[in-house]
Image (spheres, rainbow, N blue to C red):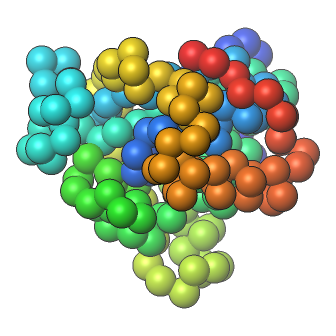
Amino acid sequence: MRANETPGRHTAIFAGGCFWGMEAVFSHLKGVSSVVSGYTGGNRVQADYETVSSGTTGHAESVRVTYDPSVIRYDQLLQVFFGVASDPTQLNRQEPDVGTQYRNALFPADKEQARVAAGYIAQLRRLDPWKRPIVTRIEAFKGFYPAEDYHQDFALKNPDHGYIRRWDAPKVAALQRTFPQFWKSTFTPR
């Protein structure tokens, strides 16, 4: 399912567990000029780490990816999302993190992203590569609220943090192995 995008910068919102790992993966892609960790799915008033961590706000930890579709298209970002950034078969969790705030979801920014996301998920369901149901949801975009500064560029600033080493560094290594055509060695800071 190839995205037909207009020239210029576009944004995409992905939720797939802790935003640190999502940010680390997407920050190593050619054509990506910014990755911001934040909250999507709830309202601005409740968009802070402590409140979102309660799992009662409707938010998901997410990343806003700014990209150039002449270098990497939305459908290629989806390949990375489903291929290495998250496990689309884990309901309301990713690895050690549990709760609706860690759900696997796409928040299309426009009709083209919605079309491509729905088609991509349908294709994956037919192929059934995980031999488990895909639980990734496509949700209406209600707004994106950047997370606190200490969450931004977390893997870059804290490469030896235990969580980064255990859960997120392997995702970045898998990106380099699995998608060498999209890989760039430098981390794109916020």
Q: Quadrant of residue 129?
A: bottom right
Q: Is residue 125 above or below residue 56?
A: below
Q: Residue at x 34, y 44 (%)?
A: 139
* Residue 96 rendering spot, x and y as whole percentages: 36, 63
Whether residue 146 is visible to the viewer of this picture, yes or no, is no
Q: Is residue 13 above or below residue 47?
A: below
* Residue 49 rendering spot, x and y as whole percentages: 23, 30
* Residue 168 rendering spot, x and y as whole percentages: 57, 50
* Left or right: where 66 falls relative to 181: left
* Left or right: where 13 falls relative to 98: right
Q: Quadrant of residue 141?
A: top left
* Left or right: where 188 falls relative to 186: left
Farthest bottom residue?
131
Q: In the image shown, does 24 or 126 lie closer to the viewer?
A: 24
Q: Residue at x 75, y 35 (%)?
A: 29
Whether residue 177 is visible to the viewer of this picture, yes or no, is yes
Q: Quadrant of residue 143?
A: top left
Q: Residue at x 12, y 18 (%)?
A: 45
Q: In the image shown, does 166 or 115 lie closer to the viewer?
A: 166
| Picture quarter with the C terminus | top right
* Residue 30 rendering spot, x and y as whole percentages: 81, 30
Q: In the image shown, does 95 or 26 lie closer to the viewer?
A: 95
